[in-house]
Image (cartoon, helix red, strand yellow):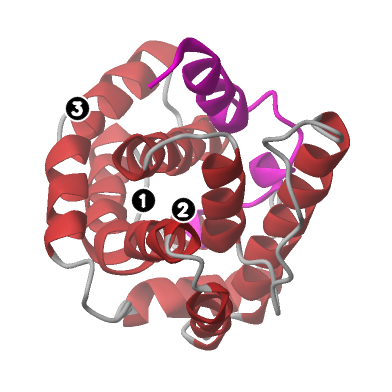
């Protein structure tokens, strides 16, 4: 990866990049309120589940498939995956969160890099889910698929830890230790994604889906999902 491409990948995955992802917990707040996640140990199990059951077969796989479609000029597949990402999520709040982040990401990226060759034409997406939107901006930034999957995985895992720090009694040191432990498994997860790149995206996480759907009924909320 060229230095400028590496720097832009860092910028896009940094929480400082204002796409609003910090406002969503993807059901974690509900799990904390119900007592299923209560400390660093149970948050670690939540992150392991996310990596294995959400990132590998769904979000990460979708990102890689979208980037490969962009490389091949197959925009129909790109749009179909964006449609699938919306259809596969039962919780309306999570669908709204993903498309909200995706649309802000595409809009902000186009504004910042307007006029540069890397920005190119905007690809019209039916919903602009986050994974599809990140695929577009990584592709336009010249980031190759494997590095993009690693960066996107880091972004999602760091976001979980960030939410956990605000929801459970856990310090920064514990949070960093937990993130480091989970990141150790990220390269293998990305390798598995590439071995299954011709498979359809899928998601079967009933308890997580229920937590996400029940978030709106919590007595008090810090997050929007």
Q: Nearer the viewer, mark 2 or mark 3?
A: 3
Residue 168, given in percent of the width and then of the height, sits at 47, 36
Residue drawn 70% across the image and 29% down it? 17
- Specify whether residue 26 is in view: no
Marks 2/3 in contact by CB < 8 Å: the verdict is no
The reply to whether the magenta stretch includes residue 80 is: no
Q: CA distance from mark 2 to mark 3?
A: 21 Å
Residue drawn 64% across the image and 52% down it? 24
Q: Is residue 127 above or below residue 49?
A: below
Residue 222, given in percent of the width and then of the height, sits at 71, 47
- Name the N-terminal-most of marks 2 and 1: 2
- Per the image, the residue denoted by label 2 is 32
Give the camera-side residue of 192 and 217: 192
Left/right placement of residue 25 relative to residue 173 reads right
* Mark 3 residue crowding within 10 angstroms, few (<14) / some (14–19) / many (20+): few
- Name the N-terminal-most of marks 2 and 3: 2
Residue drawn 23% across the image and 34% down it? 182
Q: CA distance from mark 2 to mark 1?
A: 5 Å
In the structure shown, which secondary structural element does the residue marked by tag 1 occupy? Answer: loop
- Name the N-terminal-most of marks 1 and 3: 1
- Per the image, the residue denoted by label 3 is 181
* Mark 2 residue crowding within 10 angstroms, few (<14) / some (14–19) / many (20+): some
- Count every numbered label the image shows and give the total: 3
In the structure shown, which secondary structural element does the residue marked by tag 2 occupy? Answer: helix
Marks 2/1 in contact by CB < 8 Å: the verdict is yes
- Per the image, the residue denoted by label 1 is 37
Q: Quadrant of the C terminus?
A: bottom right
* Mark 1 residue crowding within 10 angstroms, few (<14) / some (14–19) / many (20+): many
In the structure shown, which secondary structural element does the residue marked by tag 3 occupy? Answer: helix
- Magenta residue span: 1-29
């Amino acid at each position: 990866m060229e230095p400028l491409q590496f720097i832009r990948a860092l910028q896009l995955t940094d929480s400082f990049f204002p796409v609003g992802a910090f406002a969503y917990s993807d059901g974690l707040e509900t799990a904390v309120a119900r007592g299923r996640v209560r400390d660093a140990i149970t948050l670690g199990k939540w992150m392991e589940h996310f990596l294995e059951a959400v990132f590998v077969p769904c979000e990460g796989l979708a990102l890689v498939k979208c980037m490969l479609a962009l490389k091949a000029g197959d925009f129909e597949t790109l749009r179909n995956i964006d449609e699938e990402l919306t259809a596969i999520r039962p919780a309306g709040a999570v669908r709204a969160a993903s498309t909200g982040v995706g649309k802000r990401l595409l809009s902000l990226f186009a504004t910042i890099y307007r006029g540069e060759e890397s920005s190119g034409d905007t690809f019209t997406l039916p919903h602009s889910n986050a994974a599809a939107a990140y695929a577009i901006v990584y592709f336009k930034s010249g980031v190759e698929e494997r590095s993009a999957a690693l960066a996107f995985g880091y972004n999602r895992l760091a976001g979980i830890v960030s939410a956990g720090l605000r929801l459970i009694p856990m310090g920064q040191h514990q949070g960093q230790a937990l993130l480091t432990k989970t990141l150790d498994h990220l390269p293998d997860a990305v390798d598995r994604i590439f071995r299954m790149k011709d498979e359809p995206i899928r998601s079967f996480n009933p308890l997580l889906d229920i937590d996400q759907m029940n978030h709106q009924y919590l007595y008090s909320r810090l997050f929007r999902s």
